[in-house]
């Protein structure tokens, strides 16, 4: 039963990760919570049974299995000279798309290059970078695993794996990969910087006072999408009235002499109204902003592609 318990514990860990990824609605999250409770009851396990944890998350085990199967299906015949040349052209096209921030087009180019030459670690690693820009971190880690499997000395693949894992809040694993990257390329300042970021985030996550609200205001206010949306929301008459009332209090209105409590309350209310208007007008913007801020949190955001 020990093996079954460890497997069930890994499945529960995977399901819990999904509930925290922000991609599920309330009904879907509730369904996962029910599934978690059923598994914990059936196998008599709970989140505190750390001795049941395995070295690798279930997703990584799954991806490794797929990678091994993919290797078996790869033909022994090397790509033709024409295929190799065309694959390089597609890779360069993908790199240009990355510079222009056309990440979906970059993924397509790198995928076509991989179809022509499955033994080139650079193609997988570059596609991992494009996937990360799109917020597809599971796909990014899978591509990094493939690149490492082809070339275990490819430091950039370890570094990009670390970035994807950090974005997934898997800080211990990210730290491990950044350290591996530094073993292969000890003087790389990007790896050093990203390692420090991952270590700091790990400390914050394990701190009892951590709020989990780390927020990069500079990245937010410099985001063109946010600026455009804010301007649109401010045209809303209800928000204008709320902001006008708050400013009146702030400059000596009827509530200004009560220790500022009314002003604080108005500020909170205005913020809530503002957020609600954004959510109603463009529910996808919040996730886009998260990806934008997250992508600029690491030193690898402007790295060159091979």
Image: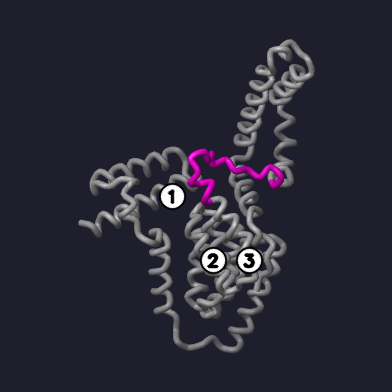
Q: Is residue 83 above or below residue 254?
A: below
Mark 2–mark 3 Cα distance, whole angstroms, equals 28 Å
Mark 2–mark 1 distance (CA, rounded to whole Å): 24 Å
* SS class, disc 3: helix
Locate the C terminus and report the quarter of the image it occupies.
Answer: bottom right
Q: Which residue is mark 2?
A: 179
Earlier in the chain: of badge 3 and badge 1, it is: 1
Name which residue lies at 64% across and 75% down: 90
Q: Are marks 3 and 1 in contact (CB under 8 Å)?
A: no
Q: Secondary structure at mark 1?
A: helix
Answer above or below: position of 179 versus 279.
Answer: below
State the extent of the magenta-drawn residues as a range: 202-219
Q: Is residue 112 visible?
A: no
Q: Neighbour class for label 2 at 10 Å: few (<14), some, many (≥20)?
A: some
Q: Which residue, given by chain and number where applicable, does mark 3 sit on?
A: 106
Point 38% across, 61% down: residue: 55
Q: Residue 3: x and y, percent?
A: 25, 59
Judge the density around disc 3: few (<14), some (14-19), many (≥20) Cα neighbours within 10 Å.
Answer: many
Q: Is residue 178 above or below residue 5?
A: below
Q: Is residue 111 left or right of residue 188?
A: left
Residue 107 against residue 150 in the figure, above or below: above
Q: Nearer the viewer, mark 2 or mark 3?
A: 2
**Residue at the spot x=57%, y=61% of the render?**
131
Residue designated by label 1: 17
Q: Is residue 217 magenta?
A: yes
* Horizontal and vertical percent position of residue 256: 73, 14
> Which image quarter: residue 68?
bottom left
In-front residue for pair 86/33: 33
């Amino acid at each position: 039963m020990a093996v079954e318990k460890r497997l069930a514990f890994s499945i529960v860990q995977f399901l819990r990760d999904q509930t925290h990824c922000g991609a599920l609605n309330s009904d879907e999250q509730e369904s996962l919570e029910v599934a978690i409770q059923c598994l914990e009851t059936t196998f008599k396990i709970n989140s505190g049974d750390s001795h049941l944890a395995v070295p690798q998350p279930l997703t990584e085990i799954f991806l490794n299995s797929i990678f091994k199967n993919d290797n078996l299906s790869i033909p022994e015949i090397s790509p033709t000279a024409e295929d190799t040349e065309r694959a390089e052209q597609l890779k360069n096209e993908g790199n240009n798309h990355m510079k222009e921030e056309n990440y979906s087009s970059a993924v397509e180019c790198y995928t076509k290059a991989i179809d022509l030459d499955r033994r080139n670690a650079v193609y997988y690693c570059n596609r991992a970078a494009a996937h990360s820009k799109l917020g597809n971190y599971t796909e990014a880690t899978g591509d990094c695993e493939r690149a490492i499997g082809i070339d275990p000395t490819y430091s950039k693949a370890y570094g990009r794996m670390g970035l994807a894992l950090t974005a997934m809040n898997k800080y211990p694993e990210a730290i491990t990969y950044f350290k591996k990257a530094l073993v292969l390329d000890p003087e790389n300042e990007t790896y050093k910087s990203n390692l420090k970021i991952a270590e700091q985030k790990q400390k914050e996550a394990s701190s009892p006072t951590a709020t989990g609200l780390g927020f990069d205001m500079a990245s937010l206010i410099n985001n063109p999408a946010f600026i455009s949306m804010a301007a649109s929301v401010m045209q809303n008459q209800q928000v204008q009235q709320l902001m006008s009332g708050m400013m009146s209090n702030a400059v000596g209105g009827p509530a200004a002499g009560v220790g500022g409590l009314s002003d604080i309350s108005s500020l909170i209310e205005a913020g809530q109204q503002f957020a609600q208007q954004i959510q109603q007008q463009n529910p996808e913007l919040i996730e886009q902003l998260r990806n934008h801020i997250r992508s600029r949190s690491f030193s690898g955001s402007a790295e060159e592609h091979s």
